């Protein structure tokens, strides 16, 4: 595949190992907003496209041992997401929340944007903790059961949510909302740029928030662009009758399931 400016960002993120690192570096959205061409994405960000293409080409010449998640089992991918991204996000939410409290109470009077960052961060945490729980307790276990049933050619009890498309749709809507909050957080911190009179504490806080942002982008990319479409495709291949209108999705029950399984 030759990289040209009309390549879709999402496809590049999927097919060029390490491309997501380059997109992070240039601030190109490859998860929720990854359906635009590289040319459009660069125009939106006001970036010189030649530089991005050169960076991507350079990547393609260096060996990369990252796993190709399009080839591995869905169960392995879901486990990987929980063991790396969910674990990291939960840990960082707790740690950075305390750090934000400390830094904003010390410097918020001079730098009021810290209070705004604190509010957006709290909102992000409040949204994503139950989101990850729904994936861990309901959606990912169903995907693993489905994959096992396919492998063993055994029967699969229809899930209470009707079809996997339903929780996937909700998870993707929640990803969009998290993506919007990350944009707000980046904007309020001026692209995580320490103010001229900002102390080392703010500099380190902003750096760590940007690391969390990059990890969330990669996390959402793995779900939106690989895990979820492959799960939908698998379900379609084994159970087209799950999609009849008799299977009414009970959204309230899906949302409430996180409370039951806590
Ligand atoms: Fe997740
Ligand atoms: Fe998710």
Image: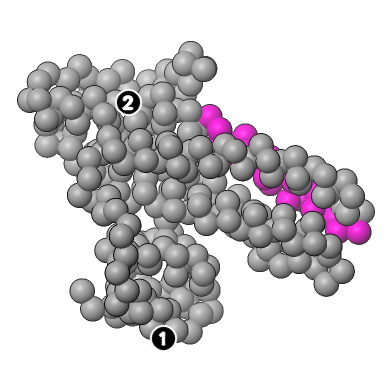
Q: How far apart are marks 1 and 2 (CA)?
A: 43 Å
Q: Residue at x 51, y 37 (%)?
A: 87
245 vs 64: above or below: above
* Local SS, label 2: helix
Question: Which color scheme does this rendered protein use?
Answer: one colour
Image coordinates for residue 69, horizontal then vertical, percent: 27, 50
Quadrant in which residue 91 is drawn = top right
Q: Label 2: which residue?
A: 141
Q: Position of residue 242 (x, y in %)?
A: 18, 26
Extent of the magenta region: 110-130
Which quarter of the figure has residue 10?
bottom left
Residue sitting at the far right? 109
Q: Is the magenta stretch mostly helix, strand or loop?
A: helix
User: Which quarter shows the N terminus?
Assistant: bottom left
Left or right, 63 with reference to 177: left
Q: Is mark 1 on a helix, strand or loop?
A: helix
Picture layout, residue 53 above or below residue 203: below
223 within the magenta span: no
Left or right of residue 229, residue 104 in this image: right
Q: Residue at x 61, y 43 (%)?
A: 92
Within 10 angstroms of label 1, few (less than 14), some, or many (20 or more) residues?
Answer: few
At a point 15% along the width and 25% down the height, the residue shown is 149
Residue 39 vertical placement versus 83 (above, below)? below
Q: Does the magenta stretch include residue 119?
A: yes
Whether residue 19 can be seen here = yes
């Amino acid at each position: 595949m030759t990289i040209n400016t009309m390549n879709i960002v999402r496809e590049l993120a999927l097919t060029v190992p390490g491309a997501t690192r380059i997109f992070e570096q240039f601030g190109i959205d490859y998860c929720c907003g990854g359906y635009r061409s590289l040319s459009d994405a660069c125009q939106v960000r006001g970036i010189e496209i030649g530089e991005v293409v050169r960076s991507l080409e350079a990547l393609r010449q260096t060996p990369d041992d990252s796993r190709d998640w399009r080839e591995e089992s869905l169960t392995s991918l879901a486990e990987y997401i929980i063991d790396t991204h969910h674990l990291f996000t939960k840990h960082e939410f707790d740690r950075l929340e305390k750090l934000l409290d400390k830094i904003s109470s010390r410097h918020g009077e001079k730098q009021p944007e810290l209070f705004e960052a604190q509010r957006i961060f709290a909102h992000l945490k409040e949204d994503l903790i139950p989101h990850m729980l729904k994936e861990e307790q309901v959606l990912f276990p169903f995907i693993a059961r489905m994959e096992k049933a396919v492998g063993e050619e055994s029967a699969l009890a229809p899930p209470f949510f009707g079809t996997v498309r339903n929780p996937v749709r909700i998870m993707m809507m929640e990803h969009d909302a998290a993506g919007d909050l990350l944009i707000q957080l980046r904007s309020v911190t001026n692209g995580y740029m320490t103010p001229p009179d900002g102390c080392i504490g703010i500099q380190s806080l902003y750096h760590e928030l940007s690391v969390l942002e990059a990890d969330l982008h990669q996390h959402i990319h793995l779900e939106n662009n690989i895990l979820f479409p492959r799960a939908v495709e698998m379900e379609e291949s084994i159970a087209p009758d799950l999609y009849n209108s008799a299977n009414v999705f009970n959204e309230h029950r899906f949302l409430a399931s996180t409370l039951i399984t806590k």
